[in-house]
Image (cartoon, rainbow, N blue to C red):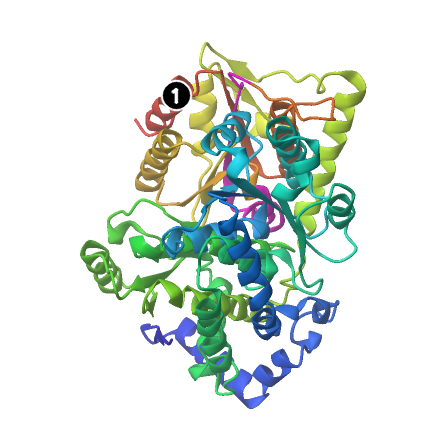
């Protein structure tokens, strides 16, 4: 339950951490956190978003209802559960499913959080809708992605099981009074599970948004909540240095203030999916007002001596299945003088403890950084631009025209006038990419933001590019798939400091899918999201380049990798 104390050479960071921990203890700030005192942060309504502190006991009361629904769907022969969500409504359930898994004989959980038409079609093909329960998760009921997913799969259910039976195959998870509740009641959904309005999406994993998918997928939710409750008790300790969540938050916050704002997540293979959830929690909570903690997940390992002074490493080590090579790498990081916090996790169900520990730590880091960790203003900005573009498509039948800066047979480059001037004269896409990557400076990070199908091959190709960029530039590297990162790390890329060198990657869709009831397709939605995202980056003055691939994504990625490698020849 505890984290290994952070070992630092005597100096300003160690002193700052000790001083802040002492202040938290002396001023009884832990008690103030638990009484939801907004003055710990910015006094701008934070107390309205602290319902996650109480959600464990609320969910324990719902356990009989969760178990009854789980038994009912098993009795009816449900073999698969298809969760339609985005951000906090999808990342938590995905982590629980991948780390813990369900009991034998339980339905398989599939989590769809991409508007890429190829990915939507793969999920459709992966399940038999006659024996599938669709879970649609949306707090507000107004989020674009869950709504277009629902439009598609409800239409498919009508085709497969008929109009009268379709609603019985759907369960909604939403906040009371939302638009999704109205849709569920209108269309006769099997059930509605309500979230808690005072719990934001990225803090919702221990609420209905996490416990319903877990229970239906055969996870022992009582045990998971029990682990979370143990951590909650430990996080009430008023001695901040011995409070596992508060101590971690102070370390993260003070490290960021000292320039170590690249929170590099190392995790044992058996618990590595946790990193995707941590990315959203940390980045969306801290990335605003020109400050951010940039989470770096699943980055290929390099020689420890090559990492810069902008890193803080956190090693989440699964004690029941550690990785020897990873242990050796962490030892080398310590020897190289890099700060490493090690958290020992007993087994898969101890994931419940980590959810709560990191929620406390993120809230505390926000307090140390002097920001409101519970809002996400730049995510909203991107949503607005996307909506303008999809509305324009429905009215005009096309997205606004755009012209590339340079192009060849494999790649086309797009960016705004400010970035064009910064790149200087370029005659080919490879020259533009090289000029862009040569803008990387000390303390910068590189983000590859791919609006592509999340296939194993595409992930591997992009991971190889990360390794090249990190090895050659020394910069921290991030990889996000759109649109899921828009509701996650996208907040930090737009609202944090201008330390990102961003490469957005888009493609032509080899095949597209209609969105039933709308005049646009999934491909149009994805393109609008990418262009809306890029538009906000432009407005924020970010160093951003968009590389557009043709319909042969594999060939395009190969050409992009060649251009990346040629940068440092």
SS class, disc 1: helix
- Quadrant including the C terminus: top left
Task: Answer with left or right where residue 198 lies relative to residue 267.
Answer: right
- The residue tagged 1 is 554
Q: Position of residue 455 (x, y in %)?
A: 41, 31
Taking the view exactly as shown, the residue that stands out farthest to the bottom is 26
Q: Residues within 10 Å of mark 1 (few under 14, many from 20)?
A: some
Q: Which range is magenta? A: 486-511
**Is 34 placed above or below 302 here?**
below
Q: Based on the displayed image, in which of its 4 quarters is residue 375 positioned?
A: bottom right
- Quadrant including the N terminus: bottom left
Q: Residue at left 35%, top 62%?
A: 348
**Residue 353 shows up from this direction:** yes
**Is 504 placed above or below 383 here?**
above
**Residue 538 shows up from this direction:** no
Q: Based on the displayed image, in which of its 4 quarters is residue 493 positioned?
A: top right
Q: Position of residue 173 (x, y in %)?
A: 65, 52
Closer to us: 91 or 153 = 153
Closer to us: 400 or 58 = 58
**Is 439 placed above or below 176 here?**
above
Q: Position of residue 292 (x, y in %)?
A: 55, 56
Task: Answer with left or right where residue 445 lies relative to residue 419.
Answer: left
């Amino acid at each position: 339950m505890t984290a290994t104390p952070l070992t630092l050479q005597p100096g300003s960071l160690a002193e700052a951490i000790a001083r802040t921990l002492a202040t938290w203890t002396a001023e009884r700030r832990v008690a103030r956190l638990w009484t939801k005192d907004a003055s710990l942060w910015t006094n701008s309504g934070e107390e309205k978003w602290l319902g996650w502190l109480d959600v464990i006991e609320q969910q324990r009361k719902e356990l009989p209802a969760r178990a009854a629904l789980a038994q009912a769907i098993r009795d009816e022969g449900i073999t698969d559960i298809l969760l339609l969500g985005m951000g906090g409504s999808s990342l938590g359930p995905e982590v629980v499913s991948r780390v813990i898994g369900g009991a034998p004989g339980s339905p398989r959980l599939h989590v769809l959080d991409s508007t890429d038409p190829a990915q939507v079609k793969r999920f459709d093909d992966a399940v038999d809708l006659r024996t599938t329960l669709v879970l649609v998760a949306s707090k507000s009921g107004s989020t674009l992605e869950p709504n277009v997913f629902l439009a598609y799969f409800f239409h498919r259910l009508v085709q497969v099981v008929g109009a009268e039976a379709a609603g019985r195959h759907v369960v909604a998870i939403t906040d009371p009074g939302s638009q999704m509740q109205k849709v569920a009641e209108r269309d006769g959904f099997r059930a509605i599970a309500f979230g808690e309005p005072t719990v934001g999406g990225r803090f919702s994993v221990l609420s209905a948004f996490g416990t319903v998918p877990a229970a239906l997928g055969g996870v022992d939710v009582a045990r998971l909540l029990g682990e979370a409750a143990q951590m909650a008790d430990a996080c009430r300790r008023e001695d901040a240095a011995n409070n596992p969540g508060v101590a971690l938050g102070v370390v993260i916050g003070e490290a960021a203030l000292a320039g170590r704002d690249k929170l590099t997540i190392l995790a044992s293979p058996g618990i590595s999916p946790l990193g995707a959830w941590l990315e959203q929690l940390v980045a969306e909570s801290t990335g605003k007002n020109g400050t951010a903690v940039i989470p770096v997940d699943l980055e290929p390992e390099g020689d420890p001596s090559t990492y810069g002074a902008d890193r803080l490493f956190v090693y989440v080590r699964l004690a029941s299945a550690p990785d020897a090579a990873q242990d050796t790498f962490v030892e080398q990081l310590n020897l190289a003088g890099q700060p490493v916090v090690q958290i020992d996790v007993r087994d898969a169900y101890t994931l419940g403890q980590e959810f709560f520990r990191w929620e406390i730590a993120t809230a505390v880091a926000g307090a140390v950084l002097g920001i409101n960790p519970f809002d996400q203003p730049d995510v909203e900005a991107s949503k607005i631009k996307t909506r303008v573009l999809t509305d324009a498509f429905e009215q005009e039948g096309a997205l606004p025209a755009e012209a590339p800066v340079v192009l060849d047979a494999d790649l086309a480059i797009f960016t705004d006038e400010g970035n064009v001037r910064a790149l200087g004269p370029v005659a080919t896409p490879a020259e533009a990419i090289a000029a862009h990557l040569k803008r990387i400076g000390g303390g910068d990070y590189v983000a590859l933001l791919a609006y592509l199908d999340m296939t194993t091959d595409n992930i591997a190709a992009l991971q190889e590019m990360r390794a090249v960029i990190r090895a050659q530039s020394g910069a921290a590297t991030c990889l996000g798939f759109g649109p899921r990162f828009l509701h996650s790390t996208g907040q930090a890329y737009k609202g944090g400091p201008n330390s990102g060198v961003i490469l957005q990657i888009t493609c032509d869709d080899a095949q597209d899918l209609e969105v039933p009831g709308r005049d646009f397709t999934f491909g149009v939605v994805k393109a609008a999201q990418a262009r809306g995202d890029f538009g906000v980056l432009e407005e924020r003055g970010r160093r951003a380049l968009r590389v557009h691939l043709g319909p042969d994504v594999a060939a395009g990625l190969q050409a992009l990798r060649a251009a990346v490698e040629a940068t440092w020849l």
